[in-house]
Image: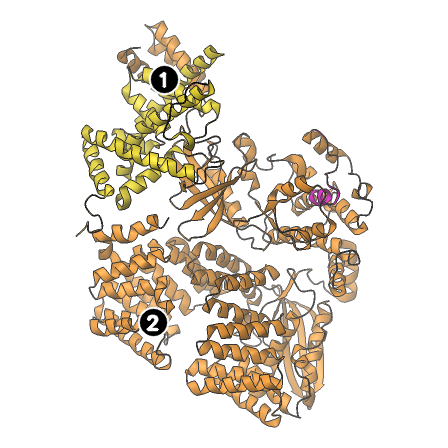
């Protein structure tokens, strides 16, 4: 009786089988994972808002990691599952961070503040908020001719995955991940510095 | 951009981006021969590649300064609790150690490409050194940790969490610090730096920001942080290569010595200079030459002598003024050569001003300066013979008696014990002068001086030879250099045989004089006797006490006979009655025959009613209560003994054990730490504290302390096999094996062989393991634990017959012990384990059912219960026991290293029930 501890309906059970599906390449599984992750991230962020957030900021990987630990429970031991979870969460994080940065910007200009769920959990410097949006927009352009490179940046930058984890999620070799990331960064760097000059 | 064009760029980019200069240019030209536009686009991309630095290397929401959030888990072990502070030193966090529980501080060392293997190695070595510094005023460094994440590795240091305010913050808040507080802080700073210097560690970045203050006023406690490692904690903005250059400039120049600013070699004198600046600032409220630019200030210090602090604070103690100025001498060789000298100079002449000092201590401190200053030294050595070291780490070796008479042998032995006790009571003992406790010396055969220095961590030995000649007792006593065994001082004390009472007094007086230590008040023994005992009683007492000190069963029997005769001669001789009570108690301990416990109880009560201020009587009472199961009562009795005789090392040791047994862990730890702070170079203190941590599974704390013990007493096998034992439970097999072989090379001991056997077993070398344990049982044939381990080794080596033989022998030994103490959980559990091994399930379960009391829930006991359950086929109960054990702090490595659990670990329930505890317990 290997699963006597995991009762049916336990989210850890659901997550584990979804991740297994995801590893087999089932795109449907990802769609079902996203709301689960979003909910958990949201819950955690609120938790941090109530608790000790003074002078603190949340780290992407810390938040995602905790969400994962809670969702996957005792099945959290498999690092490959963890990588796939992070892979999916990276996309959610990108959305959340960009929304948040834009909302801040809107607030600053006196516009109506769009209510963003993770808002208070993140404290950026202005430069970072700007960078998050700029990277996001540049990635939208890059995606038009190189989706894989775009995904690598998403996983590394928004998801906080390391090279090996990124490689696992995308079924690539770590060397390829490193090489692609180098080039994508160089290109993005050009995009962002050019924008900056344009703005000033 | 089209995907095709991008792919082409990608291909070229991959090959050329690693090239540079002309190579890159020619490769680029070759690849883009037909497409100048592609070439210019690539050139732009390559330019960006070279310029981008660590752009996007951190995760997006890593916060304002890459700060870690509360709840973040570093290296799967440390949970960030809160951010404490930032600055030039890297971020500091309070964190919870989920493995060992408890709060620690974490310092992040910023990830840098420049962390190559070499600099990491050097950093490791410095941390290794730094963590040997154990002193109440030094923030302990535990370990280096690594955390892998996107954007590179985070390297961090774990260290003791010291709550409080930095000296820098306090000076900023209140400016000049009040005289009394300054004095209190200064003494602790000197002691802290001194302890580090003795361990071979320079601070290199001593400044108010590295000093943590706890409390205020006269009772301020100061803790110095970042010994030796400060320069590795440079902040992200300084280039790593600057921060890591040996001798190079790092950190804040404000408190640097001239030699450090010039990039010259650093020494103790460099720390003394920085200390001088801190003292200057505390006393006057500002550093000398304080001006707008930090470098302006520093340059002036390089070329000018600072204005005297008295110029700003007119009523400053002249001794302080002098001492600070000498610390700030631009020539390192003109400064004090140790911080001990600084503290002596500060308090030596300030005794009359505000800081009250015992006059004897002041005189003693002043004397130390005299011996170590060059010119005076030469003169003294002519007059007084070879010099004595300024730091005196004394060991009194058991005296021998020339001739076969056992009574006089015991007398000689007793004299050396009394001398140890008397010397350790001398005023003015402290960090630099201390006496190795008797319990570390007592097992040495009289007259054997070999390896005494390295095995006791002493630099001076006191030896003695007693003779009886023409009715006179003659004791030739010597002070020897512990390494060379050269005689540095010697003296002969002679008394009539009947006058042995006076021998003890004379002995301590003469030895103290030879060592240039302050004169003793009187022998402690004799001070405990108010009315002179009847003739002959004292002699019997003295001799009996000599036997008692030797602690073997036969010597104990002899001691009882002699002490009973002393009491017979003088029924009101309270000290003899109390000592007799201790001897009875020992007899009970050896035999577990209840009549001796009752005799001990009666005798201690009688001694107390004769003299209610007699510490020995309370010691006896405490031991009796302890063995009767009244642990709180034992604590109270021993506390009473301690308050009557606060300098007694033996009592403190007994009290710490009593605290531990009574569950008063904080008190036990505090007591052991105090002992260590008093004698920071005494290996016994490290060993005691480490053993305490080891008992409570705080292996990360125990390890550096045991290691320090091996370094302080490199010839003592005990220190080595203790360290080996810790390595073994931590799963550090390679280290364990190396250190245990060293222990055996020093002297073969059952403990060392047994620990080595355990290590070999966990490496799968079963036959070797059995061979080691055979050696162990040979040396200690009555130790059931060794037989049990031997049996296990044979099972693994597939020798069932030999295994059962060993198990049966273990059962015999355990039952012999259980006959005396039938409720001993350890014994019951061992019995169960043996029965399980002998496949006698019913007997095994019966033994487990008898476990009782709170100690039945300790990780060790639970672990062993799980072993029994697994062996008799009760998998479910085994898992449940392990789950509780892991929750109570059992390291997973222990389960993983236990082959009996191999199949249990393959059970799917293991991960979900046991292994996950480690995560969930976070």
Is B298 inside the magenta-drawn segment?
Answer: no
Residue B438, located in which quarter of the rendered image?
bottom right
**Which residue extends farthest left?**
A1
Give the x, y percent position of residue A66. Answer: 35, 40
Callout 1: helix, strand or loop? helix
Q: Which chain is depicted orange?
A: B
Q: What kind of element bears circle 2?
A: loop
Question: Which residue is at the front of the view, B392 or B23?
Answer: B392
Question: Residue B607 appears in which quarter of the rendering?
Answer: bottom right
Q: Residue at x 56, y 88 (%)?
A: B563
Point out the image quarter for the N terminus of chain B: top left
Q: Which residues are magenta?
A: B276-292
Q: Is residue B766 left or right of residue B75?
A: left
Circle 2 crowding by C-alpha within 10 Å: few under 14, some 14–19, many from 20: few
Which numbered dot is residue B878? none
Tell me the CA gap for discs 1 and 2: 68 Å
Please give the chain letter of the residue carrying mark 1: A
Return the x and y of residue A31 as percentages of the image width and height.
Answer: 22, 29
Q: Are marks 1 and 2 on the same chain?
A: no
> Which color has been applied to chain A in this rendered view?
yellow
Q: Using the image, tell me which numbered label, if any, was put on residue A137.
A: 1
User: Chain for mark 2?
Assistant: B
Circle 1 packing at 10 Å, graded few (<14), some (14-19), many (20+), is some
Q: Is residue A142 above or below residue B117?
A: above
Residue A191 in the figure: left or right of residue A22? right
- Does B284 lie within the magenta span? yes
Question: Could you tell me if residue B715 is visible in this image?
Answer: no
**Image spot of residue B854 (x, y percent):** 38, 68
In the image, residue B739 lies at what x, y percent? 44, 58
Q: Nearer the viewer, residue B655 or B40?
A: B655
Residue linked to disc 2: B852
């Amino acid at each position: 009786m290997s699963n006597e501890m995991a009762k049916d309906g336990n989210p850890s059970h659901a997550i584990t089988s979804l991740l297994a599906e995801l590893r087999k390449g089932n795109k449907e599984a990802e769609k079902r994972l996203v709301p689960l992750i979003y909910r958990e991230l949201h819950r955690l962020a609120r938790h941090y808002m109530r608790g000790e957030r003074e002078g603190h900021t949340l780290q992407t990987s810390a938040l995602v990691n905790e969400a994962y630990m809670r969702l996957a429970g005792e099945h959290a031991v498999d690092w490959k599952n963890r990588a796939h979870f992070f892979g999916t969460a990276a996309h959610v994080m990108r959305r959340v961070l960009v929304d948040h940065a834009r909302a801040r910007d809107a607030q600053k200009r006196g516009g109506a503040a769009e209510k963003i769920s993770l808002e208070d959990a993140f404290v950026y410097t202005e430069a970072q908020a700007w960078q998050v949006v700029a990277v996001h927009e540049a990635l939208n352009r890059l995606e038009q001719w190189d989706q894989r490179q775009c995904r690598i940046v998403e996983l590394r930058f928004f998801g906080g995955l390391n090279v090996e984890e990124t490689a696992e999620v995308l079924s690539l070799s770590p060397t390829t991940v490193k090489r692609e990331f180098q080039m994508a960064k160089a290109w993005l760097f050009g995009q962002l510095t050019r924008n900056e000059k344009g703005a000033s | 951009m089209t995907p095709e064009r991008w792919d082409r760029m990608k291909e070229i980019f991959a090959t050329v981006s690693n090239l540079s200069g002309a190579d890159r240019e020619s490769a680029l030209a070759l690849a883009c021969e037909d497409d100048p536009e592609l070439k210019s686009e690539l050139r732009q991309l390559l330019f960006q590649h070279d310029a981008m630095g660590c752009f996007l290397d951190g995760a997006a929401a890593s916060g304002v300064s890459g700060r870690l959030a509360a709840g973040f888990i570093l290296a799967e072990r440390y949970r960030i609790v809160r951010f404490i502070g930032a600055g030039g030193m890297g971020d500091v966090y309070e964190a919870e150690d989920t493995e060992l529980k408890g709060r620690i501080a974490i310092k992040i060392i910023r990830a840098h490409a420049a962390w190559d293997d070499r600099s990491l190695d050097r950093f490791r070595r410095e941390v290794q050194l730094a963590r040997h510094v154990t002193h109440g005023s030094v923030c302990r460094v535990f370990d280096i940790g690594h955390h892998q994440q996107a954007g590179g590795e985070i390297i961090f240091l774990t260290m003791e969490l010291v709550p409080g305010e930095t000296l820098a913050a306090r000076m900023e808040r209140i400016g000049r610090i009040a005289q009394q507080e300054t004095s209190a802080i200064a003494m602790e700073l000197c002691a802290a730096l001194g302890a580090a210097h003795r361990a071979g560690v320079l601070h290199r970045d001593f400044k108010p920001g590295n000093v943590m203050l706890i409390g205020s006023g006269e009772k301020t406690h100061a803790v110095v942080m970042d010994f030796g490692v400060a320069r590795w904690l440079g902040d992200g903005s300084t280039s790593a290569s600057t921060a890591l250059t040996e001798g190079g400039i790092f950190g804040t120049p404000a408190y640097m010595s001239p030699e450090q600013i010039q990039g010259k070699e650093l020494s103790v004198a460099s720390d003394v200079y920085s200390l001088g600046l801190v003292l200057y600032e505390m006393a006057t409220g500002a550093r000398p030459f304080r001006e707008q630019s930090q470098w302006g200030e520093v340059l002036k210090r390089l070329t000018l002598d600072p204005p005297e602090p008295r110029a700003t604070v007119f009523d400053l103690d002249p001794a302080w003024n002098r001492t600070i100025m000498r610390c700030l001498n631009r020539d390192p060789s003109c400064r004090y050569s140790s911080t001990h000298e600084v503290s002596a100079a500060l308090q030596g002449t300030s005794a009359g001003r505000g800081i009250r000092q015992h006059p004897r201590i002041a005189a003693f401190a002043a004397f130390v300066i005299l011996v170590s200053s060059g010119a005076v030294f030469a003169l003294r050595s002519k007059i007084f013979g070879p010099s004595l070291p300024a730091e005196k780490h004394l060991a009194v070796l058991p005296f021998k008696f020339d001739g076969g008479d056992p009574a006089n042998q015991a007398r000689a032995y007793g004299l050396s014990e009394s001398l140890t006790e008397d010397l350790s009571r001398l005023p003015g003992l402290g960090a630099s002068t201390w006496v190795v406790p008797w319990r570390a010396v007592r097992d040495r055969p009289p007259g054997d001086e070999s390896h005494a220095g390295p095995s006791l961590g002493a630099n001076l030995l006191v030896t003695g030879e007693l003779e009886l000649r023409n009715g006179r007792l003659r004791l030739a006593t010597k002070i020897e250099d512990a390494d060379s065994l050269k005689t540095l001082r010697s003296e002969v004390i002679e008394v009539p045989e009947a006058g042995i009472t006076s021998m003890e007094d004379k002995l301590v007086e003469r030895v103290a004089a030879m060592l240039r230590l302050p004169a003793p008040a009187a022998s402690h023994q004799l001070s405990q006797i108010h009315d002179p005992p009847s003739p002959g009683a004292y002699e019997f007492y003295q001799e009996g006490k000599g036997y008692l000190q030797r602690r073997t069963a036969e010597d104990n029997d002899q001691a009882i006979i002699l002490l009973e005769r002393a009491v017979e001669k003088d029924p009101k001789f309270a000290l003899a009655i109390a000592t007799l009570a201790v001897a009875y108690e020992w007899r009970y301990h050896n035999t577990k025959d209840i009549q001796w416990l009752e005799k001990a109880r009666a005798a201690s009560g009688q001694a107390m009613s004769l003299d209610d201020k007699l510490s020995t009587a309370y010691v006896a009472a405490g031991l009796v209560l302890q063995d009767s199961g009244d642990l709180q009562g034992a604590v109270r009795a021993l506390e009473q003994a301690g308050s009557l005789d606060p300098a007694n090392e033996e009592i403190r040791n007994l009290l710490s054990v009593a605290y531990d047994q009574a569950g008063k862990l904080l008190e036990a730890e505090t007591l052991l730490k105090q002992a260590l702070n008093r004698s920071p170079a005494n290996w016994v203190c490290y060993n005691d504290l480490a053993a305490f941590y080891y008992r409570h599974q705080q292996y990360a704390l125990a390890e550096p302390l045991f290691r320090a013990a091996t370094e302080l007493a490199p010839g003592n096998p005990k220190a080595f096999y203790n360290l080996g034992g810790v390595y073994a439970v931590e799963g550090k097999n390679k280290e364990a094996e190396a250190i245990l072989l060293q222990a055996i090379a020093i002297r073969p001991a059952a403990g060392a062989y047994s620990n080595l056997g355990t290590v070999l077993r966990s490496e799968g070398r079963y036959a070797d393991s059995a061979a080691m344990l055979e050696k162990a049982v040979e040396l200690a044939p009555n130790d059931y634990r060794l037989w049990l381990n031997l049996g296990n080794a044979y099972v693994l080596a597939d020798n069932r017959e030999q295994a059962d033989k060993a198990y049966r022998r273990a059962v015999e030994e355990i039952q012999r012990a259980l006959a005396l103490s039938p409720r001993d959980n350890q014994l019951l559990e061992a019995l169960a384990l043996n029965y399980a091994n002998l496949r006698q399930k019913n007997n095994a379960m019966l033994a487990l059912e008898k476990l009782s009391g709170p100690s039945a829930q300790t990780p060790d006991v639970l672990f062993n219960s799980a072993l029994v359950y697994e062996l008799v086929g009760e998998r479910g109960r085994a898992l449940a026991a392990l789950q509780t054990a892991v929750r109570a702090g059992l390291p997973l490595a222990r389960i993983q290293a236990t082959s009996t659990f191999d199949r249990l670990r393959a059970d799917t329930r293991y991960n979900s029930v046991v292994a996950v505890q480690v995560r969930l317990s976070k």
